[in-house]
């Protein structure tokens, strides 16, 4: 009877300890809608034609960073991994 109780307690301990393990989390990467080459050329021409613009070039730089981060996310090479 003692052996049976010991096995039951050991099984219960194993179940409780396995509940403490961390699940493997997979990030959900955002979707990127690609821009057509014609649109990219038009945007570049508009930026070059208006040298006083400040916000638009910054938006473009941040978009490049975002797209690089999404590519890294999809490849599973996010920082901190």
Image: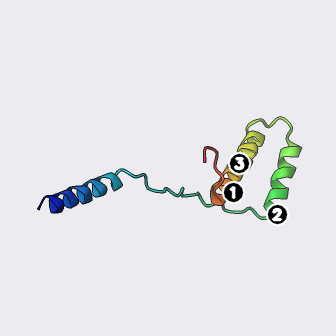
Residue placed at 27% from the left, 53% from the top?
13
Q: Nearer the viewer, residue 16 or 52?
A: 16
Label 2 packing within 10 angstroms: few (<14), some (14-19), many (20+): few
**Mark 2 or mark 3, whichever is nearer to me:** 3
Q: Is residue 46 above or below residue 6?
A: above
Residue 43, percent across and down?
A: 80, 52
Residue placed at 79% from the left, 37% from the top?
53
**Mark 1 or mark 3, whichever is nearer to me:** 1
Q: Is residue 28 left or right of residue 11?
A: right
Residue 66, percent across and down?
A: 67, 49
Residue 29, percent across and down?
A: 58, 57
Which element carries disc 1, helix, strand or loop?
Answer: helix
Residue placed at 54% from the left, 58% from the top?
28
Residue 41, percent across and down?
A: 85, 57
The residue indicated by pointer 3 is 63
Tell which residue pokes out farthest to the left in this image: 1
The residue indicated by pointer 1 is 71
The residue indicated by pointer 2 is 37
The span from disc 2 to disc 3 (Cα, nearest Å) is: 16 Å
């Amino acid at each position: 009877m003692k052996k049976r109780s010991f096995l039951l307690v050991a099984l219960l301990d194993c179940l409780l300890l396995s509940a403490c393990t961390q699940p493997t989390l997979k990030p959900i990467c955002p979707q990127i809608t690609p821009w057509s080459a014609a649109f990219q050329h038009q945007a570049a021409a508009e930026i070059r034609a208006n040298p006083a613009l400040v916000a638009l070039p910054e938006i473009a730089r941040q978009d490049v960073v975002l797209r690089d981060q999404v590519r890294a996310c999809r490849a599973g090479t996010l920082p901190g991994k």
